Image: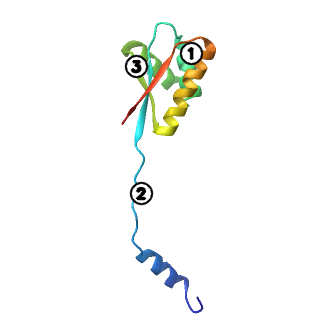
Amino acid sequence: MAGKTDFDVQERVQGEERQEVEQPPLYRVFLINDDYTSMEFVVYILEKVFRKPVVEATQIMLHVHRSGKGLAGVYSHEIAETKIAKVHSLAREQGFPLKCTMEKE
């Protein structure tokens, strides 16, 4: 490539057709209310698994308690599945029946 300048190479690269990359679909992860899981544990899950600040975690927990389910976060499919598995695992360890679901956005 003797004699080629950086400008020549850059011009050739810019002239190539750009391919658009599709964003993966996102999934909403919901916590489902039950009569046995403590409110404190739900806040703990929201803080530790979903990385919510304590005030936001408390607001979501109260929404779950009053409405039957609440949005914990929106993630790619793989991350949503991982978070759901972590919630179910931690809940079982503590003897709670807390459930999590996901729905395509």
Give residue 17's position: percent from left, percent from top: 39, 71
Residue marked by disc 2? 21
Please, what is the three-letter code of the amino acid marked with disc 3?
Answer: Lys
Q: Dot 2: few (<14), some (14–19), or many (≥20) neighbours within 10 Å?
A: few
Q: What residue sits 46% from the left and 38% below the top?
A: 77
Please, what is the three-letter code of the amino acid marked with disc 2?
Answer: Val
* CA distance for labels 2 and 1: 39 Å
Marks 1 and 2: in contact by CB < 8 Å?
no
Could you say whether the residue bearing mark 2 is in a helix, strand or loop?
loop
In the picture, which quadrant includes the C terminus? top left
**Residue 78 at least partly seen:** yes
Please, what is the three-letter code of the amino acid marked with disc 1?
Answer: Phe
In the picture, which quadrant includes the N terminus? bottom right
Check the image and report above or below for 102 versus 62: below
Residue marked by disc 1? 41
Give residue 35's position: percent from left, percent from top: 46, 7
Residue 70 got which mark? none
Marks 2 and 3: in contact by CB < 8 Å?
no
Could you say whether the residue bearing mark 3 is in a helix, strand or loop?
strand
Q: Residue furthest right?
A: 93
Check the image and report above or below for 80 versus 1: above
Residue 69 got which mark? 3
Choose mark 2 or mark 1, whichever is in front.
2
Marks 3 and 1: in contact by CB < 8 Å?
no
The one nearer the camera, 104 or 61, is: 104
* CA distance for labels 1 and 3: 15 Å
Q: Residue furthest bottom?
A: 3
Could you say whether the residue bearing mark 1 is in a helix, strand or loop?
helix
* CA distance for labels 3 and 2: 33 Å
Q: Dot 1: few (<14), some (14–19), or many (≥20) neighbours within 10 Å?
A: some
The answer to which of marks 1 and 3 sits earlier in the sequence is: 1
